[in-house]
Image: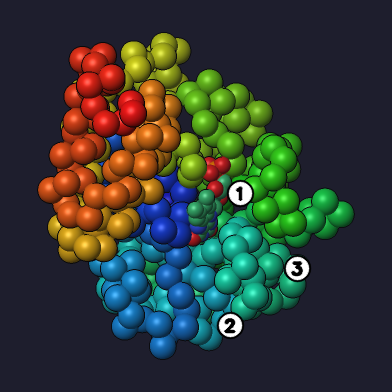
Amino acid sequence: MQIGPYAINPPLILAPMAGVTDKPFRLLCKRMGAGYAVSEMTSSDSRMWKTKKSLWRMDHEGEPEPVGVQIAGADPTALAEAARHNVDHGAQLVDINMGCPAKKVCNAWAGSALLQDEALVARILAAVVSAVDVPVTLKIRTGWNRDNKNGLRIAKIAEDCGIKALAVHGRTRDMQYTGDAEYETIAAIKQAVRIPVMANGDITTPQKALEVLKLTGVDGLMIGRAAQGRPWIFREISHFLKTGQIMPALGPREIREILLGHLEHLYAFYGEQAGVRIARKHLGWYAKDCAMNVSFRNVVNRAETAVDQMRLAGEYFDALQSGAMADIPFAA
Ligand SMILES: Cc1cc2nc3c(=O)[nH]c(=O)nc-3n(C[C@H](O)[C@H](O)[C@H](O)COP(=O)(O)O)c2cc1C
């Protein structure tokens, strides 16, 4: 898949997820086979740009090309300014969030709430595209609600405004995350536009990835929640699409190595205190399919230092590896 000058290979993309797709996680997913990873959304409100959180979100040092940054907001001028600001800080692709149903975003009439106002969508897209000389992409849902599935019209507006690629989550805004993603609307959008289209929503296994590709004919697949605690899903999908074979499952030893490396990067990026706190949710996700997950979380969440967190996480996966779960506190 080509987005402007960037070849996205493989066309498997980590979806933007606030609170999840920070730099350590993006780097890890890219290392584990994602062809591209979009940052967490950054606010278009310039008063927020100096907060610690924004500075973390705008830090792209050492990130492999292309660096993609998502912006969120509702005011065309502010979004254009945010796009320029992020490009000045290393963004090589700017993505506009019209897909997120989160309250904080929608209260400010942003995210997927914007889909209701097609004229405003056009003004925002035109303003951002003309503000920067890097490719601008757009992330949407299939529409506002079941009776207003205007994803196709938004896609055409996007193409006309110079958007270089489109990601479509197969749910309407009012569905939030309930029900199942549907792919018929994504297939119709793919048919209707010439720009690359990425399908998103509920792609959780290599088999599902193939099914969605067949149903939609899209250029790329965007994966969100299924990558939490399983960043290697990208190479599993790649392997399956190339060979038709399922890769052997990772063992506790390999998961341990990936996880401990991830923890170290979190401490280095955020500092120990914030790093330990942010690591907790990732630890829960890594262990979610493993034995003793609940007791693991209870024990590991009590760790207050990096050393303790690393030790407890390491011990858990060592015990899984040796089959000696009864010998460690998780089994209590
Ligand atoms: C915790 C979380 C945070 C999210 N944050 C964003 C965001 O910042 N911007 C955005 O466009 N979508 C956001 N999303 C939506 C995802 O990008 C994606 O569209 C959605 O999770 C469906 O894909 P999936 O089924 O592969 O997870 C978020 C989703 C989750 C679960």
- Left or right of 276? Residue 295 is right
Q: Residue at x 28, y 20 (%)?
A: 325
Residues 160 and 60: in front is: 60
- Within 10 Å of disc 3 (Cα), the crowding (few <14, some 14-19, many 20+) is some
Of residue 307 and residue 96, the one placed in the foreground of this image is: 307
Q: Residue 229, image x and y in percent?
A: 37, 38
Report the residue marked by disc 1. 168
Quadrant where the C terminus sits is: top left
Give the residue type at disc 3. Gln
Exactly how many numbered labels are in the figure?
3
For marks 3 and 1, give the CA distance: 16 Å
Question: Dot 1 lies on which element?
Answer: strand
Please say if 239 is above or below 8.
above
Q: Which of the 4 quarters of the picture holds residue 183?
A: top right
Relative depth, front residue between 159 and 84 = 84
Report the disc number at residue 116: 3
Q: Which residue is mark 2?
A: 75
Q: Amino acid at mark 1?
A: Val
Q: Is residue 116 above or below residue 199?
A: below
Circle 2 SS class: loop
Left or right side of 86 for 180: right
Name the residue: 24% across, 50% down: 303
- The x, y position of residue 109, in whole percent, is 66, 75
